[in-house]
Image: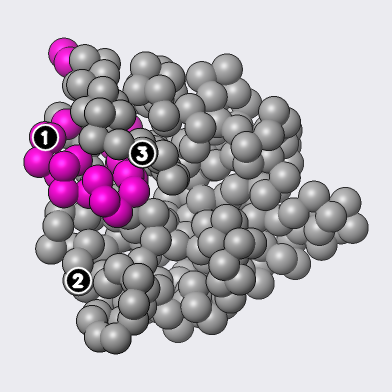
Amino acid sequence: MEKLVVANLKMNLLSLVEREQYLKAFKKEIKGKKMSKAGMVLCPPFVHLEAFQKARLGETALGAQDMFWERSGSFTGEISPAMLKNFGCEFVVVGHSERRRYFSESDEEVKMKIAAAFKIGLKPILCVGETRVERNSGQAARVIGRQVKSALIDLSRAKAENLTIAYEPVWAIGADVTPTAHEIMEVKVLVRKILVEIFGKKYANMVKIIYGGNVTPQTTKETCLEPGLDGALVGRASLAPHEFIKIVEIINNN
């Protein structure tokens, strides 16, 4: 199974100049490089999707950072799955901790977005994870289990091969701390067990489980390779193309 490395550029690249500088740097970094074992997904802000799609950045796929669950209609300010699909997106991030935290996104809303993504032919990247308080109080497994089950419980097993789950401990995002390889492995085992309950073992093994949260070239081995994960969801480091490509190379070569 090919691994997956996702760049979440978040609310950055504030101007046309910044965007063009990023695209130029990214093209330079990937020139002549073959990543046969690790697929790359770039998730820029909505306003840059068309430019990224037209930039033809090698073998990279295009993804979105979020979406609404309705196809069209009177939903001011929202982006529909049909829009994403028609502008070249293959993937979409759903349920990111920042959406849950700052926009009060509920488990039910995440479930509807997952269903809408699959309906239009997008590949969702479902984010799950616990806060520091939840981990310290022994609630991590309960929280992550609830998030996974509520989002996927009604999905058919045929959807499994196009699903990715990103474990992003909220307390590690944007911080200079990382969970241990053992802590990440525990979550991987938990999530895989839940997937088996939902899809059965054969189809559960088709789902990619990746890690997100302070992923850098220096932390990739501990957070992605040692726990045996299927890739990474990269935040801050993805804003520097050379850092992001280093991460991809490390995962591709191991």
The residue labelled by disc 3 is: 14
Q: Name the front one of labels 1 and 3.
A: 3
Scheme by which the image is coloured: one colour
Left or right, residue 231 beside residue 141: left
Magenta highlight on residue 56:
yes
The residue labelled by disc 2 is: 82
Q: Residue at coordinates 34% horizontally, 48% vertically from top-left?
A: 45
User: Is residue 79 or residue 34 the one in the foreground?
Assistant: 79
Mark identifier at residue 180: none
* Residue extent of the magenta highlight: 30-57
Could one spot residue 177 in this view of the protein? yes
Instruction: Tell me which amino acid carries mark 2.
Output: Ala
Q: What x and y, as percent, mark residue 77?
A: 35, 71
Instruction: Tell me which amino acid carries mark 3.
Output: Leu
Q: Residue furthest right?
A: 137
Q: Residue at coordinates 21% horizontally, 15% vertically from top-left?
A: 28
Q: Residue at coordinates 16% horizontally, 13% vertically from top-left?
A: 32
The residue labelled by disc 1 is: 56
Left or right, residue 41 beside residue 173: left
